[in-house]
Amino acid sequence: MRRALLGSVLVLALTGCGGGGGTPKPNEPDRASNVAVLAGALSGSFRFDQVRFAAGSSATTAAADYRRIVAGMGGVKPRVRAAGTSLRWSWPLRGGTWTYTTTVSARGADGPISWSPTAVSATLTDPKAVLRAASVEPERGDILGAGGQALVTSRPVVVFGIDMAQVAKRARAVRSARQLARRLGIDPEAYAKLVQAAGAKQFVEAITYRAGQAPLRAGQVAAIPGARVVHTNAALAPTKSFAAPILGTVGPVTADMVKKDPATYRAGDVAGLSGLEARYDDQLRGTPGTVVDRVAGDGTVTQVFDAQPVDGKPLTTTLDLKLQNLAEKLLAGVKPASALVALRPSTGEILAAANGPGNGGLNLATYGRMPPGSTFKTVDSLAFLRAGLTPSSTVPCTDSITVDGKRFTNDSDYPAGATGRVPLSTAIANSCNTAVISQRAKVSDDALASAAASLGFGVDHDTGFPAYFGQVPAAASETEKAADMIGQGKVLASPMVMASVIGAIQSGASTVPRLIAGTTLKPGGTPLTAAEDDQLKEIFRAVVTRGTGLGLADVPGKPVIAKTGTAEFDRDGKRLTHAWMIAAQGDLAVAVYVDEGVTGAQTAGPVVEGFLRGAAKQVR
C-alpha cells in the first residue's frame, strides 16, 4: 500500500470564511439556531460572520483557525449537522466515511459561541494542531496469463525526478530539471515545463527505469539541487515490449481523467492509461483508503481515522508467457510494421498477440485493418465448395484476366508450368489469382459473406479487448468483386481473424477468439459440414505439400495446413506488397503479417516456421 497526501488546498466554499463581506449564501440562517449556523459555516453553506460569537471569539479567528485545521484534508467537503450544542461530522473519504460528534461551547443552541478548535475535532486540544488526510493506495491487481503466469505484476523500478520541497526557489528547481534531463538523455525543455508547473512540495518524475537498467546511480545526480532517485515498485510486464499495445500502461492520472470522473480519480492517483490496464482499471485498481492524522504543533502525529484500501483483483488472460516471448523474439528483427497472432482452434484462446517494433506502438495484431491478400482464398474456397466445386474441379489458371478493362495477373514468382486448366486444389496451392477471379460469377456477394462468416470472418463480437473481425462488403462493380476475391478491393482483416480462419478449418468449427479468460461467445455464420471441412483440409494441406507453403513441409509433428498471401498497395509513389502467411498444426493456428515484404512465403513464411518449430519445443 502507498500513502499519499490528499493535498494542501481546500476546495470548500471558504471564500466566506473570513471576517465578513461577500454575497450571502442562498440558505440564509434566519430560522436556524446559532449552533446550526456554525454547522452551516463549517460545511460551507453559511458564512462565519453570520454566527454570533461570545466575547473573546470572532468570525475572523474562527474562519482562520478552520482554514488552517482542514487545509490538509485535500479539499474534501464535510457534512456538519447541529444537534443542540453538538455538531455531528461526516467526512466522505475514500474507503469510508469518517463520522464523529463534537461539542460547541455555548449556553444552549441559540447562545453565543465561544470558539475552540475542539469544535472541529475533540483531538485538537493543542491550538496549533491540524488534521491531515493521506490517501492509501491499494495493491494493483496483476494481469495473469495462461496457467496463472504473472504477466503484469509489481516489479522494482528506479524513478529519477526533482523534489520541489528540497529546492527553495522555483527558478533553481527549473535549472535543476534541465540539468537532470540532460544527464538522463530526455528533453530538457519539456521536463523543465513540468517542474515549472508543479506544486511546491511535489515530486516531479523525469523518467522511470526497471531496476538494473538505470543509466545513472543516485550519487551521479546528487550534486543537482533537488534531484532524487526513488526506488519503488510499479506494475510492469516482463519486458518493455511484452504485449505492450494490448496490455497497456499504468501511470499518474491525467487532468482529463480527473475532470471526467472526479468521484473515482484525484490528482496524484495511479491508474490504467491504455490497453487492458485502462479497460479493466476498476477491477485492477481496487479502492483507495484514507488515513487521517492529527498533527500537533511539535510535529507529533496521531492517527484518528483509518479506512483501509481494498486491493485490486487480478485479470486473467489466455496469453502464454513462453509463446508470447517466442513471437516477440521472432518479430524483433523485422523492420517494417508486423504482427503475429497464435490461438488454440479448439477454444479460440489467444496464446500470443505480438506487435513488431516497427508498429509505432499500434496494436495491429488484434485490431489492424489490412487487405488479407490471398489468405482470403480460404473464404473463396469454402464459397466455391458450396457453389458445387470440389478440390478436383478444373479451373482456368491463365497468365492474366481482364475484368471491365482492369487486368489482373498472378504474382511475379508464380510457377510457369502451373497454368492452364488445373484442379481447384492446385490453383489454391499455387495461389492462382486468375483462376479464383474466373469463378467469381459462381459466388454472389451474399454467398461470399456467408462463407466468411462460417470461418469467423466479418462477424463482430464484444470480446472485452480491441478486436477487429474483418469486413466483406458487397462489391460496387465487377472490378471490385474481382479484387475482393483475391483479398484486396475493400476486404479487410486483422492477423487475429486470419488466425481464427485457418483455425476454423483446422478444427472443423469456428470459435470466437478470446483473450480474457472466462469469456464465452457464440460464433456466427452457418457451421461447416464435415464434408466441407475435409475438402478444405485437403486444399490447404496441398499448399504445404506442393504449393507456396512448401517451406513448412518438414516442420516436425502433425500435418501443417497453410495459405500464403500478398496484397499490393501504393505508398509514396511506390508499388509495395503486404506479406501474409497463416498456418495451423495440431491445436495451434498462427497468422503473420508484415507491412512491406516480397511474398508471403519469403517474408512471413520464415516467421511462421520459426513459431511452429519453437512452439513444438515448448510442448516437449
Image (tube, rainbow, N blue to C red):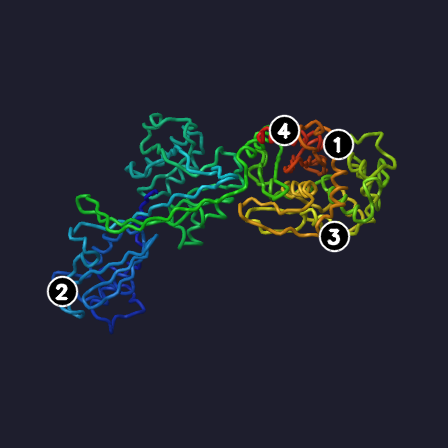
The amino acid on which the numbered mark 1 sits, given as a three-letter code, is Thr
The amino acid on which the numbered mark 3 sits, given as a three-letter code, is Ala
Which of the numbered marks, if any, corresponds to residue 613? 4
**First in sequence: mark 1 or mark 3?**
3
Q: Which secondary structure, mark 4?
A: helix
Establish if 196 lies above or below 53. above
- The label nearer to you, 4 versus 3, is 4
Residue that mark 1 sits on: 548
Find the distance from the CA under tag 1 to the CA under tag 3.
29 Å
Q: Which secondary structure, mark 2?
A: loop
Question: How far across and down, in percent of the image, does residue 463 sit?
Answer: 57, 49
Find the distance from the CA under tag 2 to the CA under tag 3.
85 Å
Crowding at label 2, few (<14), some or many (≥20) Cα neighbours within 10 Å? some
Find the distance from the CA under tag 4 to the CA under tag 1.
18 Å
Question: How far across and down, in percent of the image, does residue 318 sit?
Answer: 54, 41
Residue that mark 3 sits on: 474
- The label nearer to you, 2 versus 4, is 4
Which of the numbered marks, if any, corresponds to residue 54? 2
The amino acid on which the numbered mark 4 sits, given as a three-letter code, is Arg
